[in-house]
Image (tube, rainbow, N blue to C red):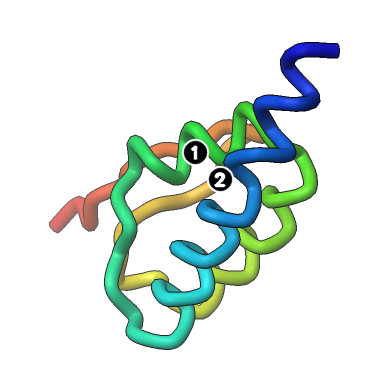
């Protein structure tokens, strides 16, 4: 119950930061995305859309986990 209260308090901040990232194209950072991804399944949809829109961030979803990827040249 306490966890739900905490998530409901931080969700608006996280949504705002994800919206800014979507509008600006600025990567909010893997650590932030991990926190959102792991703590709030509702934000996973938003993150999936952002990663599809900004592949240049170099972050992918593999087996339900966010990872950084590099081009292997």
Residue 51 percent coordinates (x, y) = 50, 65
Q: Name the side, left or right, on which 6 lies relative to 71.
A: right
For image coordinates 47% across by 78% down, the residue present is: 22
For image coordinates 47% across by 35% down, the residue present is: 34
The image quarter containing residue 68 is top left
Which residue ends up furthest to the left in the rendered image? 73
Mark sitting earlier along the chain (2/1): 2
Q: Is residue 24 above or below residue 47?
A: below
Residue 47 percent coordinates (x, y) = 59, 58
Label 2 sits on a secondary structure element that is strand
Residue 24 percent coordinates (x, y) = 34, 85
Q: In the rendered image, which residue does mark 2 sit on?
A: 61
For image coordinates 73% across by 39% down, the residue present is: 8
* Mark 1: few/some/many CA within 10 Å (<14, 14-19, 20+): some
The image quarter containing residue 23 is bottom left
Quadrant (top left/top right/bottom left/bottom right) for the N terminus: top right
Label 1 sits on a secondary structure element that is strand
Q: Find out whether the residues at labels 2 and 1 contact each other: C-beta distance under 8 Å.
A: yes
Quadrant (top left/top right/bottom left/bottom right) for the C terminus: bottom left
Q: Distance between the residues labelled 2 and 1?
A: 5 Å
Q: Is residue 68 above or below residue 2?
A: below
Q: Name the side, left or right, on which 65 lies relative to 22.
A: right
Q: In the rendered image, which residue does mark 1 sit on?
A: 66
């Amino acid at each position: 119950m306490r966890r739900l209260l905490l998530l409901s308090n931080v969700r608006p901040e996280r949504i705002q930061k994800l919206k800014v990232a979507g509008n600006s194209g600025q990567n909010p950072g893997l650590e932030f995305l991990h926190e959102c991804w792991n703590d709030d399944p509702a934000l996973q949809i938003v993150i999936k859309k952002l990663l599809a829109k900004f592949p240049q961030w170099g972050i992918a979803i593999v087996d339900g986990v966010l990872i950084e990827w590099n081009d292997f040249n």
